[in-house]
Image (cartoon, rainbow, N blue to C red):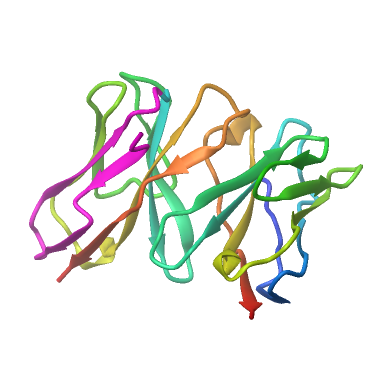
């Protein structure tokens, strides 16, 4: 299965943008890029996903590199409620339906 | 709209006891999964069901069995619990294609003593 690499932790100030990077150099052409986040004592929550084009929704934006070997989750204005572990995951092809979670990035948001 | 409902939320078992974790979804999703989450190990897939009537092993199926009772319900059974099965268990569903994200239940925290 294709793997992803994320920084262990990042910090941000409230109301500032946050850019969470993810490297996936072995991504295949059919792999979707998913982002989930997990708040303490809760199940992971879907944030956004995409294949090739940049994606926007009410929670965040996903910027995908042209060669698809990396992507960036963008939180436009961080709030204290965005403090969580963020997971970048690839899914597709032989891994269809099977999400392989790495360790994720712990995001700390300072007031 | 409840989404994915897991019961129970907490459970303590003695080694050797059996129990069934229940999961029900009201989103009309075909695919359902059971994951476990352990500190330092991330989330790992135990079993999954691509559609009603089918089940397949995931990464860590030993010690578990599953039943896809109908489209809504997917249960996970521990026949003889072991301390190594102490974990948080998540039931997950997905829609019809990779155009849909995955929806997680709130989890069952299981302790085996």
Residue found 42% across the figure and 55% down from its top: A43
The number of discs equals 0
Which residue is at 73% across, 30% downward? A30
Q: Position of residue B100 (x, y in %)?
A: 58, 31
Q: Tell me where the magenta segment starts and ends, as one range.
A: B1-28
Name the residue: 22% across, 25% down: B69
Residue A49: x %, y % from top left = 67, 41
Q: Is residue B23 magenta?
A: yes
Query: Which of the 4 image quarters holds residue B22?
Result: top left
Q: Quadrant of residue A55?
A: top right
* Residue B75 magenta: no
Q: Is residue B99 above or below residue A101?
A: above
Q: Position of residue B32 (x, y in %)?
A: 39, 33
Left or right: B20 as drawn, with respect to A49: left
Can residue A103 be seen here? The reply is no
Q: Is residue A98 left or right of residue B54?
A: right
| Above or below: residue A67 compared with residue A30 | below
């Amino acid at each position: 299965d294709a793997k992803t690499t994320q920084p262990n932790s990042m910090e941000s100030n409230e109301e500032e943008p946050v850019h969470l990077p993810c490297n996936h150099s072995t991504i295949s052409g059919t792999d979707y890029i998913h982002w989930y986040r997990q708040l303490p004592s809760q199940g992971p929550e879907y944030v956004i996903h995409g294949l090739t084009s940049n994606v926007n929704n009410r929670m965040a934006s996903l910027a995908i590199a042209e060669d698809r070997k990396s992507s960036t989750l963008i939180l436009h204005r961080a709030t204290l409620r965005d403090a969580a572990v963020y997971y970048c995951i690839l899914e597709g092809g032989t891994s269809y339906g099977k999400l392989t979670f790495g360790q994720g990035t712990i995001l700390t948001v300072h007031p | 709209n409840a989404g994915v409902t897991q019961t129970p939320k907490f459970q303590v078992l003695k080694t050797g006891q059996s129990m069934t974790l229940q999961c029900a979804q009201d989103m009309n999703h075909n695919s359902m999964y059971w994951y476990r989450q352990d500190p330092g190990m991330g989330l790992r897939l135990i079993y999954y069901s691509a559609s009603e009537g089918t089940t397949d092993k995931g990464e860590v199926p030993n010690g578990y069995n599953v039943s896809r009772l109908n489209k809504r319900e997917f249960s996970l059974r521990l026949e003889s619990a072991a301390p190594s099965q102490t974990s948080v268990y998540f039931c997950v569903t997905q829609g019809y294609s990779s155009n849909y994200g995955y929806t997680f239940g709130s989890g069952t925290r299981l302790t085996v003593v």
